Image (tube, rainbow, N blue to C red):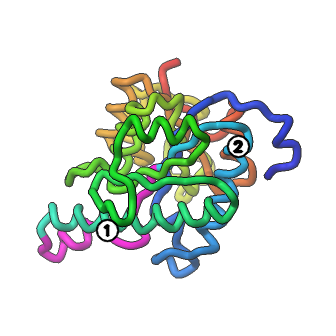
Amino acid sequence: MLAGAKQMQAHYKRVVVKLSGEALSGPQGCGVDPHQADFIARKLKAVYDLEVEIAVVIGAGNLWRGNIGVAHGMDNVTADHMGMIATVINGLALQDALQRLGIEARVQTAVQMNQITEPYIRKRALRHLEKGRIVIFAGGTGNPFFTTDSAASLRAREINANVIIKATKVDGVYQEDPKKNPDAKRFDRMTFANAIDYRVKVMDMTALTMCMDNDMPLIVLNFWEEGALTRAVCGEKVGTFIGDE
C-alpha cells in the first residue's frame, strides 16, 4: 500500500479497471508471468483497502490475437472465440494472485465454463461487489466481433460503476504519438465527442460510443506509474479524464 493511503479518501465507490492481456506478460511479451499478476494484484489491493468496490475486465493479447489468425485464413468467429477463452486464463491468474493477498475474488465469464468459473450473472456480480469481493469479468461480451473494451463499457453500465479506468502504458491521451513527438500535447480532459473526433486509440469506437450514450466517464492512465491508480480513484487529476461532466 502507498504511504499514507489510509488517510486518502476514495472519490468513486465502484470502479471498473480495464486491463490489457499484455499487462500479465513478462519480459518475453507473451504468456502469463506470475510476478506480473502479483504486481497487478498489489495495485488493486491499494484501491481495495480504500473500501472501493472493484471489477476488472481483462484482455487476452498476451495469449492470442484473433487478427493474426484471421490474417492466416482463420474464420473470424473462431478466432474471437479463442480470444474469449484466453481471457479466462488471464482472469484465473489474477484471481489467484488476489486471493494470495487475502482478497476474495471471483471470475465470471460470458462463455460458460461452470467447472472452472461462474457464469456472468449481473445480480450475482453485484452481490459479490457488495460483499467486498473483486469481480473479474472474462469472456468479453460473449459475442464475436466485440472487443474487451466494449465488454468493459457494457459491464460498467450493467453494474452501475462510477467510472472506467483504462490501464495503459502511457499517462493519458495525446494529440500526437508522444514516442514520435516528445512535445505532443497531452489532454487533461476531453469530451466523448472530442475523443471520437480524434479517433483516440485507447478504446475502440464502439466502446467510446457506449460510454458516451450512458454517461460513463473514463480515465486513461499509466497503470505502471507509482500511485497513479490510487490517486485517480481518490479524485486527483491523473491521466486524461474523458467525459461530459
The amino acid at mark 2 is: Thr
Which is more toward the observer, 127 or 180?
127
Residue closest to the far bottom: 28
Give the label on residue 230, or none: 2
Assess whether residue 70 is covered by the magenta stretch: yes
Q: Quick one: SS at disc 2?
A: helix
Percent x, y of residue 205: 31, 40
Does 207 sit above or below residue 34?
A: above
Q: CA distance from mark 2 to mark 1?
A: 30 Å
Which is more toward the observer, 224 or 118?
118
- The 10 Å Cα crowd at callout 1, few under 14, some 14 to 19, many 20 or more, is some
The amino acid at mark 1 is: Arg
Does 240 sit above or below residue 221?
A: above
Percent x, y of residue 168: 54, 53
To which residue does mark 1 refer?
65
Percent x, y of residue 85: 31, 65
Q: Quadrant of residue 206?
A: top left
Q: Is residue 20 left or right of residue 45?
A: left
Magenta residues span 57-74
Give the label on residue 16, or none: none
Closer to viewer: mark 2 or mark 1? 2
Residue at 64% of width from left, 73% of height from top? 35
Residue at 50% of width from left, 74% of height from top? 32
Q: Quick one: SS at disc 1?
A: loop
Residue at 61% of width from left, 30% of height from top? 13
Assess whether residue 92 is covered by the magenta stretch: no
Q: Is residue 117 left or right of residue 98?
A: left
